[in-house]
Amino acid sequence: MAKNKPVQCLVSAKYDNLTVDRRSANYQPSIWDHDFLQSLNSKYTLELIDNLQRLGLAYRFETEIRNILHNIYNSNKDYVWRKENLYATSLELRLLRQHGYPVSQEVFNGFKDDQGGFIYDDFKGILSLHEASYYSLEGESIMEEAWQFTSKHLKEVMIRKSMYLSQNKRSVQWSSLCIGKSQLEAKWYHSKYTPTLGEFLENGLVSIGGPMGTMTAYLSGTNPIIEKELEFLESNPDLIHWSFKILRLQDDLGTSSDEIQRGDVPKSIQCYMHETGASEEVAREHIEDMMRQMWKKVNAYRADKDSPLSQNTVDFMLNLVRMSHFMYLRRDGHGAQNQETMDVASTWLFQPIPLEDNHMASTAPTADEFPECSFS
């Protein structure tokens, strides 16, 4: 028999000095500075530490993490966010024990029920308690009970999930379609081809991710999954067709100016200008009128009593479209960051909800700001 010869990989010399230029989006530096993140309370700080550890980045903030955990451990405050919150209590115990602090297992006493189980509000609490149970010590009965309880419940969840796991293949199919549409945009860019408005929209309603997001949301949030509804969504019905053309157009109205300056591909406004010779102002008016006409088609479908879709399915799909009218109302808060964007995001995520009627009246959106949306 011939002896096996070692395989050598040969690289042609003509590629040695090859440089591949990648187009940059030229995004601005983040407006979320370090001082603002430091101002968040202990719950979010602990979650931030946990995320840094999971990402493998905690080594870059060892001093900050050590000081934060030291202050939390030595504080006698009974934090409101932790009281009656299994997730927060489990997260704190796990991080503190992981870093050498002797936290008592008795912090979980308030979450025990009469049957030896644990009181919890959501899956997040069960998962957090399960992770914390792996930091138990010899002789700790509560921590052992926590492991037994959470292991049982997590196994039950996995069994239920596996029953419709095969349905997720359909979401993957949508994902492949979305990738294909994005590749077509890249082809247009490199060939310097400006599509017609019709070509752009047929591609853009998929590349923006609306159909894929709808399918993912349906598979993740619907219980039980109804085969008839799923098949109907896969057929790319008119409701999806018109809804996500609206999403695509609203996105373009808010973001295209900044994206074109960054060297991105032409959007619907530029496609219409190129196709008809219209000015940008006229093109924007045309796009806005198109959206109004499309909303009429969507509203007609929403009123159809013979639709195979449940009202909940229709609602979560159209809420995504309605949200775009707010998200892109004043340009693009991601690609072109500004203080207004930061204020809005801070209000949503970090500020308490005001209960005073006069304040709510002064900050409520008006029909003039969102003509396509209903606030009833």
Image: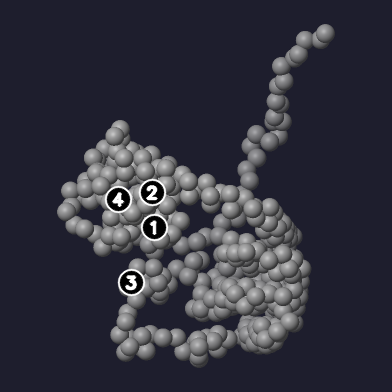
- Residue 175, can we see it? no
State which mark lies toward you, 2 or 4.
Answer: 4
User: Could you tell me residue 106's position as x and y percent?
Assistant: 25, 47
Q: Real-space Cα distance between discs 2 and 1?
A: 10 Å
Q: Real-space Cα distance between discs 2 and 3?
A: 28 Å
User: Dot 3: few (<14), some (14–19), or many (≥20) neighbours within 10 Å?
Assistant: few
SS for dot 2: helix
Considering depth in this image, is 303 or 276 the residue closer to the camera? Answer: 303
Sequence-first disc among 4 and 3: 4
Q: Residue at x 28, y 55 (%)?
A: 110
Horizontal side of residue 14 vs 30, given as left or right:
right
State which mark lies toward you, 4 or 3.
Answer: 4
Q: Residue at x 59, y 61 (%)?
A: 220
Name the kind of residue labelled 2 in the image.
Leu
Q: Real-space Cα distance between discs 1 and 4?
A: 11 Å
SS for dot 1: loop
Name the kind of residue labelled 1 in the image.
Tyr
Residues tagged 2 and 1 counted as in contact (Cβ below 8 A): yes
Sequence-first disc among 3 and 1: 1
State which mark lies toward you, 2 or 1.
Answer: 1
Sequence-first disc among 2 and 4: 4
- Residue marked by disc 2: 129
State which mark lies toward you, 3 or 1.
Answer: 1
| Label at residue 351 | 3
Sequence-first disc among 1 and 4: 4
